[in-house]
Amino acid sequence: MASSGKKRTTMAKLNRESRLRERRLDKQARKDARKNAPAPDPDAPDTLSTASGEAPGTGAGPALAGEPALAGQPALDTVVQALADA
């Protein structure tokens, strides 16, 4: 069957397909990097809770039930009650 010589695929479709191929390659590269990464050391301390140098539970987040409020911040129950009264 002979080619008609006319390009039937639009540039938009070609661009979408090339972006899709690139995303797939990036995804495969990330997957391979995760596979090749060293396994986490179970004896190592948790880096998320100790990254700021503070003890866990003393971050800037809201106080949880049973935890004291941080200095200068009202307890969570006080804030909720103030919003309910408004």
Image (cartoon, rainbow, N blue to C red):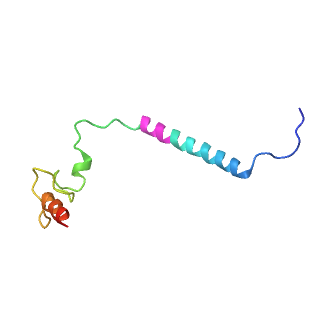
- Boundaries of the magenta span: 29-36
**26 or 85, which lies in front?**
85
Q: Overall secondary structure of the magenta stretch?
A: helix
**48 or 12, which lies in front?**
12
Could you tell whether 78 is left or right of 11 in the image? left
**52 or 3, which lies in front?**
3
**80 or 65, which lies in front?**
80
Q: Is residue 10 above or below residue 3?
A: below
Asked whether residue 33 is drawn in magenta, I would say: yes
Percent position of residue 58, x then y: 16, 56
Q: Is residue 62 above or below residue 44?
A: below
Q: Is residue 61 above or below residue 21?
A: below
Q: Quadrant of residue 59?
A: bottom left
Percent position of residue 47, x then y: 26, 47
Q: Quadrant of the N terminus?
A: top right
Could you tell whether 10 is left or right of 80 in the image? right
Question: For the point 76% across and 46% down, which residue is it?
Answer: 9
Percent position of residue 76, x then y: 15, 58
Outermost residue, top side: 1
Question: For the point 60% across and 44% down, which residue is it?
Answer: 20
Outermost residue, front side: 85
Q: Quadrant of residue 35?
A: top left
Percent position of residue 36, x then y: 43, 36
Q: Is residue 45 above or below residue 63?
A: above
